[in-house]
Amino acid sequence: MRRLYYLLVCALALSCGAPKDKDTAQGAQPGDIIPAPVEYALTSGSVESAKVAQLPQKVKISEKALSKRLNGKELTDWQLKGAYWLEVGKKTVKIEAADEEGVFYARQSLKMLAALDSTVTCCTILDWPRFQYRGLMLDVSRNFQDKEFVKKQLEMMALLKMNRFHFHLVDNPGWRLQIDAYPRLTQFTAWRPIPDFWEWEDSGGDVSGGAFVEEGTPGAYGGYYSKEDIAELLAFAAERQIEVIPEIEMPGHNYETRAAYPELVCSLMKAPDDWELCPGKESTYEFLENVLLEVFEMFPSPYIHIGGDEAGKRNWELCPDCQARIKAEGLQNVEELQSYMIKRMERFAHEHGKRIIGWDEILEGGLAPDATVMSWRGTEGGLKAIAQGHDVIFTPSRYCYLDHQQDSLQYKPVSSPVPLEKVYSFEPLVEGISEADVHHVLGLQGSLWTEWVHEAWHAEIMLYPRAFAIAEVGWSQADKKNYPDFERRARAWSAVARQMGYNVYDSKNKQYTK
């Protein structure tokens, strides 16, 4: 991380020579930053970017003072926490906010202004977020990235005023989180003999067929985060106003869990290559509850993401334990069995002061009473959840899945292209949401799955500049949307990000570089 900090300082102190399609005589202006601020005005003069960080800052944390700046504009409590007024003068910087969060965001705007040009135009900015949840998800199960890589992305998220990091820690190809009660999860299923995900998956075999190897095996690929690593990452994120939400998958995507603890498999299996846990066995719930107790202790977020997607359910139709559970609980089918499991885990989470998030498949068989739905198969699941009175986070794959290629020529194509303009075009308040239900839309998330993304540089190529668009859609007002102007600003910030050491896809010329 020292290299990243050094590069950021350099970017703040020097002109980056970023391209602009406007007169640059006055230097960087509020209309150049990402995400676009709600209101701003230019004042006379400018200040050298290299001197901005040394200007004395007069900070006032006062809801009353900020309310005067808002001049009658009504904000929700969470918007007010993130709101700020910033004045950049020749000799001083003034910040007014209702909370430290707003002060932090004012300083991110100041950093971005200073990084964009050799001078900053004197100005005022009045700004606040549009949505409460402005997130990115990183899948580290399929291809592991170390804590320094995660910190680097948290740093960029902070500059973009993004505030939720969804940490996809466990899935079929590897368990990435230390759990003291179940050491085999990291001693064994955090490591596999084949680095390439698709080669590993195509190798097939059952749980005993060599899918994983012991930690320390020569040539083993993988890794995991110790509890000390997690504490370090969470402290780093908290300093940047970012909440880290862990995901512990259940009942599907658990091939690695079954490999470490095969007693969690259904007693009779119709489809041995399916990956779900057995929701009929009481030992499954004991395992999940013990795991979650340690996760709750590690992560202060009020949320736990429990997955809930793509469970095969074929084995449950044959398994005597599952059928006995269905009969005992008065359930009708395996869909209701999954709903029983999710509802039971939600009750457990509530007992420990947590709320659950699940992918939109948790709607099947009946939604848990207080669950938040992450809508990925389009927006229909989100609309259905809202109609039932539930909160929703939108991450529809055709707009927000950042593992999709950015154009038809891109390195390692995954699926139909999701170019920058398409990401930017997404509107979280989708058609069909009434004014009375708007509060149920928490926001949106860009999601990076890593089946095709092995190297750190490639992960960044997929994240940037599309994460810039996610950030702006989540923060800026809908009536400010202007793709040509956003593209100008995205190209400028991409140039800065490259100088900071990030790998950024050139969406205009359709080029990527390491």
Image (tube, rainbow, N blue to C red):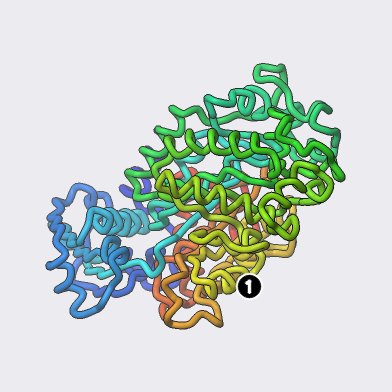
Residue at 70 percent across and 17 percent down: it is 217
Q: Amino acid at mark 1?
A: Glu
Q: Specify whether 55 is left or right of 471.
A: left
* Side (left or right) of 44 relative to 483: left
Query: Where's residue 37, x and y in %?
Result: 34, 69
Q: Residue at image x 22%, y 63%? A: 86
> Regarding mark 1 in the picture, which secondary structure is present there?
helix
Query: In the picture shown, does residue 510 fall above or below 344?
Result: below
The quarter in which the N terminus is drawn is: top left
Q: Is residue 188 above or below residue 312?
A: above
Whole-percent x and y of residue 342? 60, 52
Near-viewer residue (413 or 400): 400
Q: Which residue is mark 1?
A: 380
| Residue beneath the point at 74% across and 46% down | 324
494 w.r.t. 487: above or below: above
Q: Residues within 10 Å of mark 1 (few under 14, many from 20)?
A: some
Residue 509 shows up from this direction: no
Q: Quadrant of residue 4?
A: top left
